[in-house]
Image (cartoon, rainbow, N blue to C red):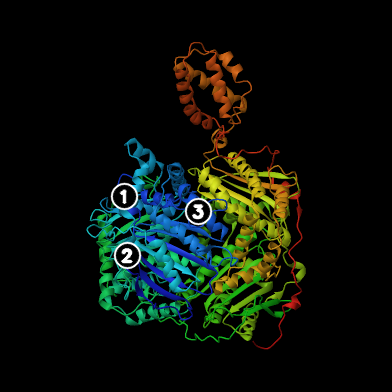
Amino acid sequence: MTPIERVADKLEAPALDSRAYRVIRLPNKLEALLVHDPETDKASAAVNVNVGSFSDPDDMAGLAHALEHMLFMGTKKVGDLAPEGIESADCWQHPKENAYNQYLTANSGYSNAYTAATETNYFFEVAASSRSSTENLTNGFTKSPLYGALDRFAQFFIAPLFLSSTLDRELKAVDSENKKNLQSDNWRLSQLNKSLSNTKHPYHHFSTGNLETLRDEPRKRGVDVREEFMKFHAEHYSANRMKLVVLGREPLDELEEWVGDLFSDVQNKDLPQNRWDGVQPYSENEVLTQVFAKPVMDTRLLDINFPFQDEEKMYATQPSRYLSHLIGHEGPGSILAYIKANGWANGLTAGAMPICPGSAFFTVSIKLTEDGLEEYEEVVKAVFQYISLLKEFPPQQWIVDEVKGMAEVDFRFQQKSPASSFTSRLSSVMQKPLPREWLLSGSSRIRKFDSEAITKALSYLRTDNYRLTIVSQQFPGNWDQKERWYGTEYRAEAIPADFAEAIRKAGEDTAHDRPQELHLPHKNEFIPTKLTVEKKKVDEPTKSPKLIRNDVGIRTWWKKDDRFWVPKANVLLMMNNPLVAATPANAVKTKLYCELVKDALVEYSYDAEIAGLDYSLGSSSMGLDIDIGGYNDKMSVLLEKVLVSMRDLEVKPDRFKIVKERLVRGYRNWDFQQPYRQVQDFTSWLGKERGWINEQYLAELPYLTPEDISTFYPQLLRQVHIEALVHGNMYKEDALRVTDLIESTLKPRTLPQSQWQVSRNLILPEGSDYTYEHTLGDPANVNHCIEYYLFVGSPADYNLRAKLLLLGQMTDEPAFDQLRTKEQLGYIVFTGARMAATTMGYRVLIQSERSTAYLEQRINAFLAFFSKSLLAMSDDGFESHKQSLITKRLEKIKNLDQESNRLWSHIIGEYLDFLQREKEVAHLRPLTKHDLVEFYNHYIHPTSPARAKLSVHAIARSAPKIVGGNITPVEQKEKVLGLVGKYLTSAGIQVDADKLTRQFAAVDVAGGDQPAIIQAITDYLGTAGDLSPEKQAEVIGQGKNLLATVLPSLGVDVLPVVDANSSFPAAPDVKGTMYIENVHVYKAGLQATAGPRPVAELREFEDVEPKL
């Protein structure tokens, strides 16, 4: 047998990277990157296949994406390790479609995949080590869960089954995924650009697919859909097109042996790389055009798309980064600074977008104001005037050196990302023609300055080589076409001659002609120069920060980085002030104030941003929040500028008008978000003692003036209590200087503790059952959503907390498998713990075309069904779930930001429970199955008299109850009887109206009892004289189709029929619910929790030592 080829053993890596790397090539030409990380607690693997939606057949759009779904649905071999009670040989004969996900869930893991234009990426994550040395034994040697996962994973590419029994389900899942995106402007505008591209290039394709393209139309043509999947796999999936990345604790030699054993059977067909060199996405027919598109959300965008060069082989110079750095700049002299000063824009981004080998776009995207929309031609001219400026001067080496230098610093101090993010990304990078030694650094570092390459790149940004897209709900208003796949209204036309001539002139402008406000940026003073880190030997990183200042006005928490040793830090500040969220009007004024400060800081802060130093300013229910993060060298400079801008803000009427209008659109657009995002906000609101929702904010905005903000914001800063966390490469005295700076700059009065906000949530009493209904705002949205929440108790009760988390672990895979995969309720299905400030519970969230009443019924069915699974669970299975959860809870922190966020959440949550995860594990370990069964029967089971439930139903406007309006149940039955009578008469059956009415006497038409309606018609036909069984069956069959359309049009919510003989669990009978008609009355009737209290005295965290 041909030996495994070792391609590279040394990879260019970040300075602090302790991993070992090796690139190998198997005899079947599958290339793999092996990563040995002795410290990781998560292992992972990813396979990237060089085929995607661009390879879809023209008459079967979405095939590559649907294949990605199908590949997960079982293989001929489940794996070497048989499930309990099954002989290994049986695994070959009786594959289980969800065996892969069951295995991953049992080992603290998960999987996912995506399909792009030229690649399909599959990845998983799993615990890096077994919970005991006696598990996963193969041939006498202990193997980690990674081996079992790889064994199963490899089979996707060796022997997928394409089970007929799963085909229709997965096509429906693809269809549901597509419907989820139908009202998303990102998807709609992207597809519009593709649909209006060159029909000879695969960029033109509809990539997601739906039932029409993948099932219905092919079947009409007599196509065997399953055969098409198998044919596509056979034609495009080949070992030489695959790149594998495996990350684990095992030594490289062992990983190499595993990969050789498990992946050598992937068939190599020696397929060439997919390329489309002979044709471009835009032909001469698509350039010099402008497209006006109407969005779902109230947004205003201007996109300028230039057909651009493919830079795949230009990894050493990356000339487009020079262009994107300058055209996308936001500082003085930039396009954005100029058009923003004219009141035309709020934001601008620019950069190259690879399409496929051989093709790319360079896109300039601008967020327009109302005035900017009217003056969009002037905005376009400004872009071309700036491009003419870039062409006037030779490429500037100092600019490339600045970008190159920051790229070097960023790569040098790059921190770890989650295991599956790393493997998925690197397997994609491996498809690029990079030297294998540069796989980690190739896309990050710029190797050299190449003036000619930059000049050539600039040559694509011409006045005869672009397309404009103008997006607005109002302008121009004369859209005359609809895009096929998403229904986006648009108008496409050639650039008017006078406008094209104005652009041509702008592109030829000299320094004398163009606005003087346009010029190259100055040197960036925020580039960090002090990058030293004092690294010390640490036996065990500390888990808690120290409280180094604790007085009536300020609490300063500090933790010197002892894990990652990077020259970075995070400063997180909360300025507690009860005024911020006292009323919806105050909350909106605070939001406006924060947005105006950020608006004023754009030009100054942009230099810091591109030098790796970011800030954010916002508000919460407790007060103002300021976060500064990045390289700590110039951090205090940025913080001081932010504080001074907050203190001295001048509310300019012109900028106030623009920012306010942007905020109004943001609040209005909230109604057009995905339903599953909206429903969670309502659940949170209904669970809080005090709080506001979007419509209340929106109601206040029209009345606010610049003077309101000018008089209000000093009150926000005048009296506060400051909570601060300083974490990273900063010493104690540095941390103290941070809060000293705040104090000296803002000079606030002390806010007495008696005025501090207290977070409280509401307690759902035992036995309660509430339902809140909200009609969604988007009239074109077809999806409903339900969040089904079961109250459990206080998050500080670790006994209950451990049981709740364990239940979430146990139901994660079965709920997904039952509710999404088998029952096909919808693409979005979440289950698990829902944590609030002072309460917690178990939730199930589903977004679906099915009615919320039906979704509630199916959730009840699943929960009743799972109680039986829990009772039947073996002790080994129970312990496996416990260990899987323990592994997840003790997962190592990956980077400084992750640790900062965790520490800060404990501080602002006010429990100060920095050892929370260790406590969870301590309470998990002794749990027995009996404990969890008792917990389940009390808090979760649908028939429990003690459980407390809140169900939030977000109902689409297309729902029957909305469409039907005010039709009464009596009127609904009368109309149905009339339509049934007309239908039977048209079928040649004589109708006795009185007899038909009596047949329907006991039928609940208004309740959507379709089986009872069908049975009533069947019984009536039985009395209708000489009617053959064949004729009866024909009439009933056509009648079912008629009812499916008629009943919803009359406002009747038809409940889908669950066959008693099906594999779907039956829903138990449950008590009735109380509908929340008045939220104030609902909240007034509930008790509030106690507020959060620290788990330890503050003095236990205090540190008065002078220095680390």
Q: Report the amino acid beneath label 3.
A: Ser
Which residue in the structure is indicated by mark 1? 492
> What is the secondary structure assignment of the residue under circle 1?
strand
Q: Position of residue 43 (x, y in %)?
A: 50, 67
Give me the C-alpha separation between circle 2 and circle 1.
47 Å
Which amino acid does the dot numbered 2 rest on?
Lys
Residue 158 rendering spot, x and y as whole percentages: 38, 55
Q: Residue 750 falls in which quadrant of the image?
A: bottom right
Task: Between label 2 and label 1, give the one nearer the viewer.
Answer: 2
Using the numbered discs, state the Cα–Cα distance from disc 1 to disc 3 in whole angstroms: 61 Å
Q: Is residue 26 visible?
A: yes
- 1 or 3: tag closer to the N-terminus: 3
Q: Kindly check if marks 3 and 2 are in contact, taking CB atoms under 8 A apart as contact.
A: no
- The residue wearing badge 3 is 88
Tell me where residue 739 appears, x and y as whole percent. Answer: 64, 80
**Number of disc labels:** 3
Quick check: 382 left or right of 639? left
Q: Nearer the viewer, residue 1010 or 657?
A: 1010
Q: Outermost residue, front direction?
A: 140
What x and y, as percent, mark residue 677?
A: 55, 53
The 10 Å Cα crowd at callout 2, few under 14, some 14 to 19, many 20 or more, is many
Please name the residue shown 32% across and 48% down the image: 231
Q: Residue furthest top?
A: 1025
Q: Does 684 appear above or below 128? A: above
Going 69% across and 39% down the picture, which residue do you hit?
1070
Q: Earlier in the sequence, mark 2 or mark 1?
A: 2
Amino acid type, mark 1: Ala
Q: Give the residue pinned by disc 2.
A: 29
